[in-house]
Amino acid sequence: MTLIQSVKHEWFSNIRGDLLAGLVVALALIPEAIAFSIIAGVDPRVGLYASFCIAVVIAFTGGRPGMISAATGAMALLMVTLVREHGLEYLLAATILCGVLQIAAGYLRLGSLMRFVSRSVVTGFVNALAILIFMAQLPELTNVTWHVYAMTAGGLAIIYLFPYLPRLGKVIPSPLVCILVLTALALYLNLDVRTVSDMGQLPDTLPIFLWPDVPLDFNTLMIIFPYSAALAVVGLLESMMTATIVDDLTDTASDKNRECKGQGVANIGSGLLGGMAGCAMIGQSIINVKSGGRTRLSCFTAGVVLLLMVVFMSDWVGRIPMAALVAVMIMVSIGTFSWDSLRNLKKHPLSTNIVMIATVTVVVFTHNLAYGVFVGVLLAAMFFANKIGHFLLISSAAIDDGPQRTYQVTGQVFFSSADKFIGSFDFKEALEKVIIDVSRAHFWDITAVAALDKVVIKFRREGTEVDIIGLNEASATIVDRFGVHDKPDAVDQLMGH
């Protein structure tokens, strides 16, 4: 594919759908950016400028067309202590360093580590985010008048029923119709409901380039590095997970390592324009995809429209009732949650269900995606190792020609199955020779090699000759390098003398 064809495909292959989807996303980004700024303890402008900058930059540098990146709640939670103890300038410096670390991760190809994240962990991550998105709407639905409930219910009705209208329903995204209709209704009836302007003051100027006003010394680095590292890890985790989900929704592939670099460049730009760190947003990405967004143009449009609306149309944007945006976000949470995972609880193995539920539980209770994914990956690895460890069969047969026995090893020998491997041999049987046939086995690690050493040396201590046959090339390499049974003083080495 030539450069021109690539640009046309990634930018201009779905213009109408991307422009409309970008408009919907921009409207939904405004209250979220303000809310995340409040969480982090900074002025609403910090979150709004960050969302604009990250969305625009990532449209050019990211590896996943159609995915929305901006200021996020997961990142905001990590900034609270830094802002409280050191102030906004240190947050901007930490944001720039976070971007540098993410670029380094991209060049180190750490995005490829996503292949170690199992489907059950991704499902748990998605379900946890859906729950968190819904929980984030509850403050807007408590201690309010009946008008808010009526508008939220009406908004959901518009979102789910409008697409069934002939022709028009497939042309205009229903979340956009929901926002416009409920705003018009609130203004016409002069309803006393909470609006976007009630969340915080919208900026009235464009962002300007500025370098963080912090000392450029080692002490500053020691202050911001732990926060920058945490922001980089959580940001990349959420971005990689979101990219995987959008891959599935659109049936297309994405470049995870390019996404790491793109997120880094976007965060550096955000820090230099007075914004906080951000990453991919699963909720907004799903709004984008369900509203018809598919290319980089939708993310670019969302960022540009967001800035234009909050700076030049703040009076109108401020009048949008929060009930309309709550309805959109409830739609997102419902669409994000994997309802199949509940139906599959009876079908899927217990270990898969435990991994999924553990991931959901940890993320929901800690509000930290990194903790949930770490627990999920750790459990999945443990269950996998335990399962593979059982795929080891050792059979034996006596040889008539003298007191000899052949052991046939079939399966995988590694740290989980090493004890089973050793326990399958009878060292007390009076034999002259033992043949260990490992042509159907594979030795994976030094624990497996140590187990083979122990078996050979134990037989030799009983006066039995041992012959190992059938080692494949990979197993022979690791046995030759780390094994001691065929080296002088093998017994002493193995026993630690």
Image (cartoon, rainbow, N blue to C red):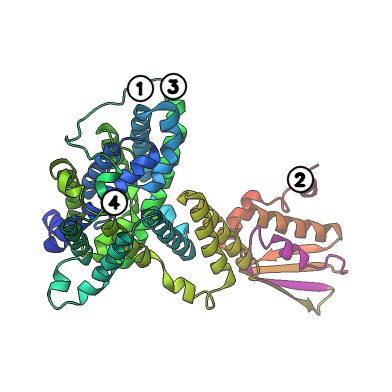
Tell me whether the residue at label 3 lies in contact with that at label 1, contact meaning CB atoms closer than 8 angstroms.
Answer: no
Q: What distance separates the C-alpha of mark 3 from that of mark 1?
A: 11 Å
| Dot 1 alpha-carbon crowd within 10 angstroms: few under 14, some 14 to 19, many 20 or more | few
Taking the image as shown, residue 299 lies to the left or right of residue 414, namely: left
Q: Quadrant of residue 413?
A: bottom right
Say what secondary structure mark 4 lies in. loop
| Residue 44, placed above or below residue 67 | above
CB under 8 Å between callouts 3 and 4?
no
Q: Where is the N terminus found, in terms of image quarters?
A: bottom left
Q: CA distance from mark 2 to mark 1?
A: 56 Å
Residue nearer the viewer, 369 or 434: 369
Q: Which mark is residue 493?
A: 2
Residue 427 in magenta? yes
Residue type of the residue flagged with mark 3: Phe
- Per the image, the residue denoted by label 1 is 214
* Callout 3 secondary element: helix
* Circles 3, 2 touching at the beta carbon (< 8 Å): no
Q: Residues within 10 Å of mark 3 (few under 14, many from 20)?
A: few
Which residue is under mark 4?
A: 194
- The mark that comes first in sequence, 2 or 1, is 1
Q: Gap in Å between the C-alphas at discs 4 and 2?
A: 75 Å
Q: Residue at x 28, y 57 (%)?
A: 325
Residue matched to label 3: 218
Image coordinates for residue 161, horizontal then vertical, percent = 24, 74
Q: What type is the residue that disc 1 sits on?
A: Val
Left or right, residue 9 beside residue 359:
left
Closest to the observer: 425 or 368?
Answer: 368
Looking at the image, how many numbered discs can be counted on the residues?
4
> Gap in Å between the C-alphas at discs 1 and 4?
38 Å
User: Looking at the image, which residue is at 19% across and 49% down?
Assistant: 317
Identify the mark nearer the N-term, 3 or 2: 3
* The image quarter in which residue 193 lies: bottom left
